[in-house]
């Protein structure tokens, strides 16, 4: 587990050797280093319960969108979480809303600026 929202349980970000996984209340995203993306939607943008798996982008679900821009996969969550994955180097950048200061836990720390 890289980061988990312990305040509201909105998201969990996990890593495997060849994939980044984002699990939210509205769905599950798995970005593979090969560029393949699996998106399982459990709540659609209107909040209706659904259970569909997508292998093509863009994908929209309640509170989250996933799209491809060139060699990047971009994931945005309404809580302010933003993940940009560069598929050329399989390097992902995570940005958290400042409201999550000290309210996360995982291998990336608690987001409280401790060194």
Image (cartoon, rainbow, N blue to C red):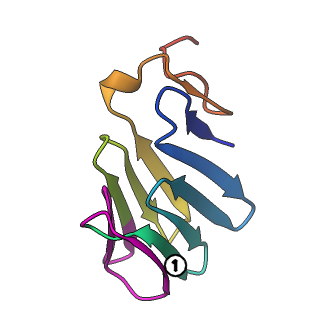
Q: Which residues are magenta?
A: 46-73
Q: Foreground residue, 10 or 111?
A: 10
**Quarter of the image holding residue 36?**
bottom right
Residue furthest toward the right? 17
Q: Main secondary structure of the magenta part?
A: strand
Is 4 on the left or on the right of 111, as rendered? right
Q: Foreground residue, 61 or 100?
A: 61
Task: Tell me: residue 31, above or below residue 108.
Answer: below
Asked if residue 52 lies in the magenta stretch, the reply is: yes
Disc 1 crowd, CA 10 A, few/some/many (<14, 14-19, 20+):
many
Q: Looking at the image, which residue is at 27% across and 67% down? A: 45
Q: Position of residue 95 (x, y in %)?
A: 38, 40
Asked if residue 21 lies in the magenta stretch, the reply is: no
SS for callout 1: strand
Is 24 on the left or on the right of 59, as rendered? right
Task: Tell me: residue 49, above or below residue 7.
Answer: below
Q: Looking at the image, which residue is at 38% across and 35% down? A: 96
Q: Looking at the image, which residue is at 70% across and 68% down? A: 18
- Quadrant (top left/top right/bottom left/bottom right) for the N terminus: top right
């Amino acid at each position: 587990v890289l980061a988990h929202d312990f305040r509201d349980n909105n998201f969990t970000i996990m890593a495997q050797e060849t994939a980044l996984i984002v699990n939210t209340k509205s769905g599950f995203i798995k970005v593979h280093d090969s560029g393949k993306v699996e998106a399982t939607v459990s709540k659609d943008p209107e909040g209706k319960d659904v259970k569909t798996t997508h292998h093509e982008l863009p994908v929209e679900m309640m509170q989250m969108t996933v799209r491809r821009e060139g060699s990047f996969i971009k994931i945005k969550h309404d809580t302010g979480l933003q993940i940009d994955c560069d598929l050329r180097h399989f390097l992902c950048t995570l940005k958290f809303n400042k409201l999550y200061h000290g309210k996360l836990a995982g291998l990336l720390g608690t987001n409280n600026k401790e060194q």
